[in-house]
Image (cartoon, grey):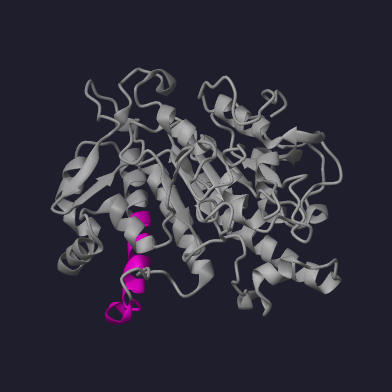
Amino acid sequence: MFISKKHLPRRTFLRGMGATIGLPLLNAMVPAGVALANSDAAPKPRMGFVYFPHGALMDRWSPATTGRDYEMTQILKPLEKYRDQLTIVSGLRNKAGESATPHAIMAGTWLGCVPPAVSHDPQAGTTIDQVASKVISQDTPFPSLELCGEGGGGPCDPGYGCSYGNTISFRTPNQPLPMENNPRKIFYQLFGQGNSDEERRAIVDETGSILDLVMEHTARLQRQIGAEDKVMLGEYMESIREVERRVQKMKSRDNSDLALPDVPVGVPDDFGDQLSIMFDLIALAWQANLTRISTFMIAKEVSMRTYTNLGISEAFHPLSHHQNNPAKMDNLAKIQVYHTQMFARFIDRLASVQDGDGTLLDHSIVLYGSNMSNSDKHNNDPLPSAVLGRGFGRIKGGQHLQFPQDTPLANLMHTLLDRAGVPVETFGDSTGIMAEV
């Protein structure tokens, strides 16, 4: 470990003309002779909330037995190697998401657990990510990130309007937060300067690389840190370089002269590439301590996306109304497994990144789930919910928990806030904290 009477501040940035890059937690940021947990550099928990639409085939999601020796199911199988960091929570219901027009309010009520008013003006509940951001992420450049895999409009309803179909994050009960699906825009928001797409485009056109702008500062920093930190810094910079390379590659496919002003620029043609790079951007933002809170909506309710890469030609939403047709259910399961595979790669990334005395996964709390159960029936009971990460050891992990029918989903939200060190008396329609988690 690098030992000195002086240490780098946790919020050290690499700076260059038009670029500012946050750093991961280095040994040089911990004062000599001070335990990490007792220093200002002690990492705070990251919290992520990853939503998938159209529920899950519950007999292929929920294990048949509870406890630690359960058999992993088809949809969760990609997470098998992280079962010690996985908590499957069954039996939950979110009454706030139940209505005669379920798709229109499904996404927007998942993290708030408050029934929305029948009005075109948004009025629901402040979501868990925004409650947490006020406590554990206000000292970061971005208190929270809101991302999505699909662009375009979400489902609307004559009674509820469009406020709840396009986001899973509400800053206040009346303020839904937009979700960004353009990875190029997010990259330069995190690592570059410029208040508009034109300014960001001009920066990269002039320089070619954000990292090139901070090379001089990087060289100076490397002379101040120890060998272990140099390796960590090198790996981190290479991760940024790889994401930047992928973002730059997309630039050649922009066709900007043909795009309407509201059409996103820089979204990959391949949906797998889109999900992969968005997850990578979240991981980089967490690693650099640019934010500790992220929400990600894999796809929107009533998604008409086709998964031809899986050999499936029928659109996602019509397929979700399977009417218990075995062939349709098998295809739907393929899509749900695919989403979990993409999510598992994100977990791979978190598990591979050192963060102080553990990994990013050790220090994170990530909820993976949906606000729908059986998509054919549009029901909300029981909901598919899985938690990854240990939250600095405050989450037990490695178990499947079965709660009584009608247990509020809000109880899990309340519990995750508690485990993250965010004190609240209650949350949504919560009836208490789950001691078992």
Q: Which residues are magenta?
A: 238-259
Q: Measured from the top left, where is residue 316 in percent x and y?
A: 66, 69
Q: Residue at x 66, y 45 (%)?
A: 97
Q: Measured from the top left, where is residue 244 in percent x and y?
A: 33, 62
Residue 309 lies left or right of residue 172; in this view the side is right
Residue 433 lies left or right of residue 152; in this view the side is right
State the residue in front, 46 or 372. 372
Q: Residue at x 54, y 40 (%)?
A: 124
Work out which quarter of the rendered image holds the C terminus and state it.
Answer: top right
State the residue in front, 197 or 115. 115
Quarter of the image for residue 395 reads top right
Please identify the dominant SS of the magenta region: helix
Q: Residue at x 29, y 25 (%)?
A: 3
Is residue 388 at all visible to an observer of this figure? yes
Residue 8 lies left or right of residue 375; in this view the side is left
State the residue in front, 43 or 269. 269
Q: How many marks?
A: 0
Magenta span has 226? no
